């Protein structure tokens, strides 16, 4: 069985989904170092989408219980045969940035850290986004297609130039 087949179950993608709002492009994290953005994305992906019992505690929707080592291992990559990871210092800096920007809260506990993604339920609800299924137009565009049959091309020493006649 191929990997793509394994990911699908009855025409659905296994494992669900998570949402990243486009407005993130105007936030401070958009200009943070890549490791901060990747750790943020990993936290969103790993956060519980429903309440879960973990080691006798309830870890709520939008929370996850992990160690910094878990984050480090969860984001490992390979260069050739070498396994690469972010340093513990990079993880600590990223977590500090996310706390300072009020994107997460953290609470140390025996065996790890309880991480809460602030406003998780709001950002993970598709109803809170423009152009969700209930207002996407299924009509074809009204603009007529452009015909490119009347192009005239000529080359300069540096460029191919096309004009619409």
Image: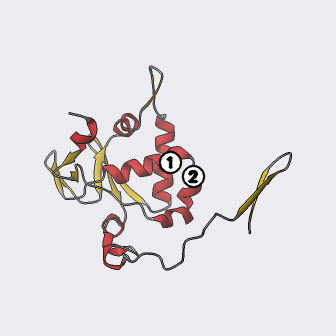
Q: Position of residue 63 (x, y in %)?
A: 29, 56
Q: Residues within 10 Å of mark 1 (few under 14, many from 20)?
A: many
Q: Position of residue 67 (x, y in %)?
A: 33, 40
Q: Residues within 10 Å of mark 2 (few under 14, many from 20)?
A: few
Q: What residue lies at 43% left-to-right and 61% top-to-bottom?
A: 103
Q: How far apart, in angstroms, are the residues tagged by discs 2 and 1? A: 6 Å
Q: Do callouts 2 and 1 mark residues in contact (Cβ within 8 Å)?
A: yes
Q: Position of residue 100 (x, y in %)?
A: 50, 59
Q: What residue lies at 43% left-to-right and 51% top-to-bottom?
A: 40
Q: Is residue 148 found left or right of 21 in the rendered image?
A: right
Numbered label attached to residue 102? none
Quarter of the rendering occupied by the C terminus: bottom right
Please tell me how many numbered marks the rendered image carries: 2
Q: Image height check: is 17 above or below 85?
A: below
Numbered label attached to residue 32? 2
**Foreground of the two, 101 or 50:** 50
SS at circle 2: loop
Quarter of the rendering occupied by the N terminus: top left
Q: What residue lies at 55% left-to-right and 71% top-to-bottom?
A: 145
Q: Is residue 57 found left or right of 30 in the rendered image?
A: left
**Foreground of the two, 102 or 25:** 25
Q: Image height check: is 100 above or below 74?
A: below
Q: Quadrant of residue 19?
A: bottom left
Q: Is residue 154 found left or right of 134 in the rendered image?
A: right
Q: Image height check: is 149 above or below 89?
A: below
SS at circle 1: helix
Numbered label attached to residue 36? 1
Q: Position of residue 37 (x, y in %)?
A: 49, 50
């Amino acid at each position: 069985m191929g990997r793509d087949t394994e990911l699908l179950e009855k025409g659905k993608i296994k494992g669900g989904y998570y949402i990243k709002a486009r407005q993130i492009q105007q936030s401070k994290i958009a200009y943070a170092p890549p490791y901060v953005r990747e750790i943020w994305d990993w936290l969103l992906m790993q956060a519980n989408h429903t309440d879960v019992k973990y080691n006798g505690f309830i870890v709520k929707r939008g929370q996850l219980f992990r160690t910094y080592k878990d984050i480090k291992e969860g984001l490992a990559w390979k260069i050739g045969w070498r396994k690469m990871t972010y340093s513990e210092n990079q993880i600590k800096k990223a977590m500090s940035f996310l706390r300072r920007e009020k994107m997460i809260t953290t609470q140390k506990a025996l065996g790890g850290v309880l991480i809460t993604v602030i406003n998780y339920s709001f950002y993970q609800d598709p109803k809170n986004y423009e152009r969700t299924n209930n207002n996407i137009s299924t009509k074809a565009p009204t603009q007529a297609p452009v015909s490119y049959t009347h192009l005239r091309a000529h080359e300069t020493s540096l460029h191919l130039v096309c004009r619409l006649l």
